[in-house]
Amino acid sequence: MRHWLCLPLLLISLSSHAASTFRCASKLVSLDDHIAEVQNKCGNPADRSSLGYKEVADRYGYWQSVPIEEWTYGPDHGMYHVLRFEGNRLRKIDSQRGN
């Protein structure tokens, strides 16, 4: 009986996570891909927004500012796909239904 109670919570938590891959036609991009690789595979986005900069520490402990951009692709069957880049690397992929 307890398993049936846990199932809805599991489904809710899975649906709230961002995807780790995005399909552009027949090509696939993944988290940590370089911005040039994504553009080469997916082409130009429908919208490209610069969100500013973020301070991050590198593996040696030095701080640097990296640019943050969001690219929006779609609509594709009513879905928009938002790709977030931090320091020219793909860090987050979200999908949302268009209005």
Image (cartoon, rainbow, N blue to C red):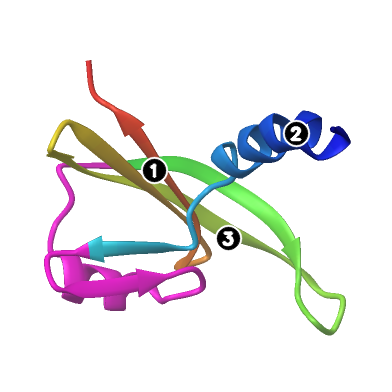
- Which residue is found at the position 87% from the left and 34% from the top? 2
Question: With respect to residue 91, does 46 lie above or below?
Answer: above
- Which residue is found at the position 39% from the left and 43% from the top? 50
Q: Quadrant of residue 29?
A: bottom left
Instruction: Give the label on residue 4, or none.
Output: 2
* Residue 77 placement (x, y as % from top left): 12, 37
Q: What residue type is labelled 1?
A: Ser
Q: What residue type is labelled 3?
A: Val
Give whichever of 75, 39 is nearer the camera.
Answer: 75
Marks 3/2: CA–CA distance:
45 Å
Question: Is tag 3's residue or tag 2's residue first in the polypeptide sequence?
Answer: 2
* Residue 38 placement (x, y as % from top left): 28, 70
- Which residue is found at the position 18% from the left and 76% from the top? 40
Instruction: Give the label on residue 32, or none.
Output: none
Marks 3/1: CA–CA distance:
11 Å
Question: Is tag 3's residue or tag 1's residue first in the polypeptide sequence?
Answer: 1
Q: What residue type is labelled 2?
A: Trp
Q: What is the crowding at mark 1: few (fewer than 14 residues within 10 Å), some, or many (at least 20)?
A: few
Marks 2/1: CA–CA distance:
44 Å
* Residue that carries the numbered disc 3 in the rendered image: 66
Magenta span includes 32: yes
* Residue that carries the numbered disc 1 in the rendered image: 50
Marks 2 and 1 in Cβ contact (< 8 Å): no
Q: Magenta segment range?
A: 24-48
